[in-house]
Every structure is written in structure tokens, then in C-alpha cells.
Amino acid sequence: MSANEHSSINSKYCSSLTQYIRRKSSVVTIGKIPMGGDNPIRLQSMTTVDTMDTLGSVEQIIRMVDAGCEYVRVTAPSVKEAQNLAEIKKELLKRGYDVPLVADIHFTPNAAELAAKIVEKVRINPGNYADKKKFEVIEYTDASYQEELVRIREKFVPLVTICKEYGTAMRIGTNHGSLSDRILSRYGDTPLGMVESALEFLRICEDLEYYNIVISMKASNTQVMVQAYRLLVQKLEEEGLRPYPLHLGVTEAGEAEDGRIKSAVGIGSLLEDGLGDTVRVSLTEAPEFEIPVAAKLVDRYVGRSKHTPIPFVEKNPINPFSYKRRKTLDVHTIGATNVPRVIADYSLIENLEVQDLKPIGHFYLPALDKWSMNDLGADFIYTGHNKAPFMMPNGLKEIVDADTWKVLDDQTHVYPLFAARWYKTDVVKHPQLNFVLADIEDIDEKLLLKMEADASVVLILESFNEHAMAELRRSFITLMNRELKTPVIIKRAYAHKNEESLILAASTDVGGLLIDGLGDGIYLSTNKLISENKMSLLANLKNLNNIAFGILQAARTRMTKTEYISCPSCGRTLFDLQETTAMIRKRTDHLKGVKIGIMGCIVNGPGEMADADYGYVGVGKDKIALYRGQTVVKKAVSSDKAVDELINIIKEDGKWLEPIVSEYI
């Protein structure tokens, strides 16, 4: 990195946009496992068993630790659960497990003060530790706001005093969905509001010379989450506060593939820039299954600093604290205000048949001699030199290699892909749409001049650097500083690896760019062998297509399916979250773009649902509250009728569609 790169970046949230440098945070003592500084990025999760079930909690904690969990969070919603943490700890020590425990506190300072004398760390939520949320807008003068800060200090100081005395660490954990009415009234529902919510408590800690602190800025909206963490780091430096360690997490990421994609888009985007000292992946699954996912995310950065050098940034045109899509031309449905497009790589498929398009969402209906397309229908198919022997369906266009295209009889409905070195020469082009494949080495003055003069070109940008996201971003910065408006498709090819690793890598590399408004499409491929059978290749194409659309959804840039904001469950949960989420998904997963929050208890709803359209929240045994946004619509619905009632509310709003059932799809 050039010595002047940091000063030239328009923010202080990371040391470099081009070289992987992990942020040097202060060290926090948490039992026998310190966090921050030069320590490894730590892995953690949270129990889902009732905290009063001592043996059940212990058994689950042991499974978590055996899976690699380094800190275990346990909910303590009241004094009785806080007291029982001592019994849990005693039993763990008896079995030879000295894992640091973290008490999770909401609303109850007295429980926090008791827990701080028992466990190694307490987590407080500044949105509800000293405030009760009533969803009221309050007008504050500077004087009245200062009075509120005095009130907060009085409630918070006893906990800080105990933590200092007992050597207990603390996480000040802001959640986007549970900002206090006071913060919302002054700062709005913004990343700045999230940061200020934490800083109010942090300033009290520093005034009392208590520094054993970790901070988090969690949200279910990945754009908001990433912006808040970046802004936090900058504000800490601006105020001359310590560089406290960061706990990274996406709240209520969900389950299965969607949960992994969303977690990687949010967490991975920050890890790419060297931020993060501990990671918790929040999945609607057993907590021991979260740890391997977190480990795969973190392990990508072991040795990352040795990556191939990338030219440093002299001027950064990207605002890291606010989403704004890069301005581009509208080139035949790509760029401008068009949704990001998806390209499927069929170049290894020989003897292509109409039914081979089914994995990417295009279905031929032979009885009707028609095509149908689902919500995950790819926009383009790249066939290389294997031109398809049939006409593409509406909604799908074909791309072939330029040397294949130039000898076609029909060049109108097929589009050429040029290698950058050939595009720089005088080539025959399609009058409307031409693709150029390039990496950072290809982007020289000659290519830039050619693209500036060509309103038909779309750049397919790839990287072979281990630090791929940063190199791709660097190429975008070159285009932006040149004010070049050529649309860009992001291409990433991965070595053949297990599905989960592929999901996490692609979601990080591509999602990190989309969150900053970079990219007009996704093109994913794996280094499959041509010798693999056709069925295996088609299964791989389906997987890549699903991942591409999942990344676009998680980055909030193209909504193609129902989004489920489901909490990961904890000891407060009042119903089986995995079973309930699956049941709701089965009934509603055809509702494109609708966001449904599924929360196990009132602590996680309605606030934690943040921007969900509808909410399903446990409020008692077999009792469910249903929400429209953050407003309760039905207060105590029997659980056996709750899903039907939820659907009725969606129908009342005119957002319900009957699912389409087809024997072909």
C-alpha cells in the first residue's frame, strides 16, 4: 500500500481498499480467551435451550464447544435465569469445559448486574437497557435530551462498576430493529442512529475508565449493517476513542442457503476490509451448526495478506456509508435502472436440449409447445462455441464466443463475447449488445477509450486474485474516476469445492460489491471438468443460479422471492422456530418480494423484525401475535390458526397470490 493511500480514502473505516490489512483493535479479556489485537478472529454462538434447564443447557454448550465455539452466549431475561448461570457454569467446569459464558440481557439491568458477577461477559442492548420502546416520536430540546442521557447514566453506572470490579467484559450490542424511541426521534432509523446508540453508553464507560468492551452493529438489512459498522469505526477514530473489537453478525439471517448467503454478504463484506474480531452466524438451526459456517467465513482470511498486489487508490468515489448504485448506460436491458442480470455458464454442456434450461428457471411445456419461466429465471446463457440448436425462450438471451458469432447465419438474436485483447482491435460487433471479458490487467487506456466510444458494450469483469473483491472494486474505481458509464457484470469462477464453501465465497466476493452499488449483474462458474456427466453439470448450474439470485436478494438489489427474517432461537423462544419457519415458508414462499419476520419471543419482535412487511411473534405458550410492519394486528392467536390468520392479513393488503401448480415445473 502506498503511504498516502489511507489519507486519500474518503473515510477512515479501513486501512486500505486494496491491501488486506486487519484492523488493529484493542485487546479485551474474556475469561481465558482474549479477543482483538493479534488474536485470531473468534467464533461464537448462542444456546437455544431454556436457561433454567441446567443440564439441557450444559449438553448443548458442550456440543457447541466441541464444534469449535469459543464464546457461548446464554439468555438471561430475568434474575432467576441470571442466577442459574452459576449452576450452568459449575456443571460445565465439573465436566472439564471452561468456556467463557456471555449473559444476553434485554430490559433488565438487575439481571445484568447479577450475571456480571458470575460469567465472563455480559451483552447489553443500548436500545432497551434503559429505555422502554413505545414507538413514539418525541421532540427533544438539547437540554431535555441531555436529561435523558443523565437518566441512562444512572441506570448504567452500577453495571459498569460491577464489571470493573469482577473483570467482566461487556458487549454493547446495537440492533437496527430495536433502536429506542429517543434515538429514532433524534437520528432516525439510520446507521448513524445505530452508532450513536452505542456511543452514548461507550462514552459513559470511558468516563469511568472501563475499557473491556466489544461493540456490534447488527441488522437484518445487510446494507444498513455494513454501513453502520463502517461508520462506527470512523466515529471511534474521530472522537479519539479506543479501537474496540468488533462483533460481527447479521440478525435473523434465516435458514439453509438463504441464511448462509445473507450472513456472508453482511459479515464477509466487512471481513474483506479487515474489520471484525469475532463472528456469530445467526441461522435458524441448532447453534452447533452455526460454528462451521462461521469458521469457513473466517478461514478465508488466513494468509490473505500475501495476496497479489493491487494498485492503490488515489481517489475513492464510493460513499461507504450510503447506498448509491453506480450510474451506467442502459445497454439492451443491462445497466441504468434495470435490475442486475444473471448469466448462466453453459459452455461445458454439449448437445444442448430444451429441457437442459430447467435448472436455470426456464421450462419447456411440450403439451402446449410453450415456454414458462419462474422467478429465478436466468437472463442470459453463455454457450461458448456450442451455439444452441434451438431458439431461446422469451426472457433468455444467448451469448457465444465472438469467433463463433461472426460465422452465424443469424447474428441478430445472439450476442458476442470478446476477449479484451481482441475488442481493442477493429472487430465486427453486434449493433446493440457486445460483451467484453477483462480483468484488471486488461483495463488500460486503449480499452477505456474503446468503451467510452461504444454505447453497445457491457464489461464482464473477472479477477484471479486471492483478494478478488478488492481487486474488482479497484477496477470499478478506475471506471468511476474516469466517469465511464459502461455496465459491468461481475464474474467469479471458483475451484470445485463443497457447496457451502462456494456459497460463502461467492456471497462475500460479489455481495460486498453490490452493497456499495457496484455491478449490473452476476456471472458465476466453477472449474468443473468437461468429463463430468451432464446431470452433474446441470445440477451445478442450478446451484450457481440459485446462489446468484440469492446474493442479489441478500444485497437488496433484486428481490425475486419471499424473504424470511427469522431469529436463530434462544432460551426465550416460545415455539419450534425451525418447524414453524418451514411451515410458513411452505405456505408463502411464492410471494415475490414480501418480507416476513418470524420471532420466537416478544424480545425479538416487533423491533428485531426491522423492515419486515409482516410478523409472526411468540407471546405465550401456543399464543402468537401477528404484525403488519411494526403494528400489532392480532394479539393472541392460537398457534394452530396463526399461519392462516397471517395469510388473511396478507390477503387484506392485496399482496396475496395463489401459488401456481404445474405438472411441468
Image: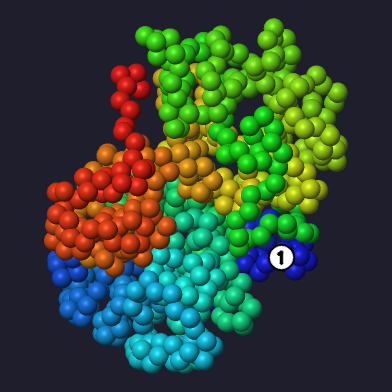
Q: Tell me: residue 101, above or below residue 220.
A: below
Q: In the image shown, does 522 or 339 lie closer to the viewer?
A: 339
> Which residue is found at the position 38% from the left and 92% from the top?
154
Instruction: Give residue 347's position: percent from left, percent from top.
Output: 57, 21
Q: Tell me: residue 618, above or below residue 512.
A: below
User: 504 left or right of 80?
Assistant: right
User: 430 left or right of 140?
Assistant: right
Quadrant holding the C terminus: top left
Instruction: Give residue 81's position: percent from left, percent from top.
Output: 20, 75
Instruction: Give residue 395's position: percent from left, percent from top.
Output: 54, 24
Q: In the rendered picture of this protein, how many numbered marks are placed on residues?
A: 1
Quadrant holding the N terminus: bottom right
- Image quarter for residue 409? top right
User: 182 left or right of 333?
Assistant: left
Badge 1 amino acid:
Asn
Q: In the image shown, does 591 or 220 lie closer to the viewer?
A: 591
Residue 392 appearing in the image: yes
> Which residue is found at the position 57% from the left and 52% from the top?
515
User: 324 left or right of 542?
Assistant: right
Query: Can you identify the residue that label 1 sits on?
Result: 10
